């Protein structure tokens, strides 16, 4: 069975967006972006909430990518080749390739997807990930911790979830970002 991976860029104080909803402070440099690309090559399907999907649609447009650095162009190819499932009660249709919209998050359907998939599955967005954490579906967490304190905003990890994690990998980057890869060991 493949892994369901929650990957997130977060401030040192645990936020993926600041209090104004901004996350431009989390944009990876070329070194970090290439590392992310190498991780993402194993992903065959992205599970996204509507807001995360709206943000990620950027990678679908050739016009957005004109003149961008090689790591960004590389990620665009990875993104475009993957399947996407958007969970939204308000979005009627998807505007990107290889994308379908589901109205509700169904843990049983995600378990079946994990059993049938031949490549890893990535889940994006803390609200959607919270449902997967609560359902015991997350296998790994990929945390990119940035050297910044933002003082509040949208938390990167859910409240009221108790998990034991095994550290599988870590990496330090020149810009001060730290990558931590954890496997979920045990839920309580």
Image: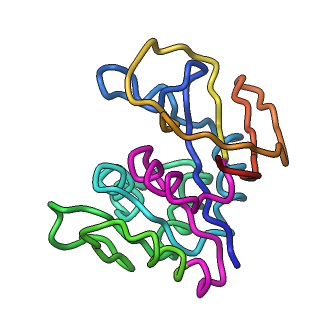
Task: Identify which residue is drawn at 51% across, 59% down.
Answer: 135
Task: Identify which residue is drawn at 44% across, 78% down.
Answer: 109
Task: Identify which residue is drawn at 75% across, 47% down.
Answer: 182
Q: In the rendering, at what x and y percent does residue 97 appear?
A: 35, 77
Q: Give the answer, above or below, for where 3 lies relative to 146.
A: below
Residue 60 shown left or right of residue 3 in the figure = left
Q: Give the answer, above or below, for where 121 lies relative to 188.
A: below
Q: In the rendering, at what x and y percent does residue 65 appear?
A: 42, 55
Residue 141 shown left or right of residue 26 in the figure = right
Task: Identify which residue is drawn at 32% across, 77% down.
Answer: 100
Q: Residue furthest front?
A: 188
Give residue 173's quadrant in the image. Answer: top right
Q: Nearer the viewer, residue 92 or 134?
A: 134
Classify the position of the N terminus by image quarter: bottom right
Q: Does the segment drawn in magenta span residue 129?
A: yes
Q: In the rendering, at what x and y percent does residue 140 appear?
A: 68, 54
Q: Nearer the viewer, residue 93 or 160?
A: 160
Q: In the rendering, at what x and y percent does residue 178 appear?
A: 73, 31
Give residue 13's quadrant in the image. Answer: top right
How many numbered discs sit on the rendered protein? 0
Give residue 138's quadrant in the image. Answer: bottom right
Q: Nearer the viewer, residue 169 or 79?
A: 169
Q: How is the image coloured?
A: rainbow
Tell me the magenta residue range. Answer: 114-141
Residue 78 shown left or right of residue 107 in the figure = right
């Amino acid at each position: 069975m493949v892994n369901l991976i929650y990957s997130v860029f977060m401030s040192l104080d645990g936020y993926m967006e600041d209090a104004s909803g901004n996350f431009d402070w989390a944009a990876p440099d070329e070194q970090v972006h290439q590392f992310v690309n190498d991780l993402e090559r194993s992903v065959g399907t992205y599970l996204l909430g509507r807001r995360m999907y709206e943000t990620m649609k950027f990678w679908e447009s050739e016009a957005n990518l004109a003149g961008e650095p090689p790591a960004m162009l590389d990620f665009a190819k990875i993104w475009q080749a993957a399947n996407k499932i958007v969970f939204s009660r308000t979005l009627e249709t998807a505007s990107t390739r290889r994308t379908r919209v589901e109205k509700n998050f169904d843990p049983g359907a995600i378990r079946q997807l994990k059993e049938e998939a031949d490549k890893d599955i990535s889940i994006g967005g803390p609200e959607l990930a919270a449902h997967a954490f609560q359902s015991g579906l997350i296998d790994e967490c990929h945390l990119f911790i940035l050297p910044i304190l933002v003082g509040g905003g949208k938390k990167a990890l859910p409240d009221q979830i108790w998990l034991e994690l095994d550290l599988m990998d870590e990496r330090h980057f020149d810009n001060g970002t730290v990558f931590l890869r954890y496997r979920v060991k045990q839920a309580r």
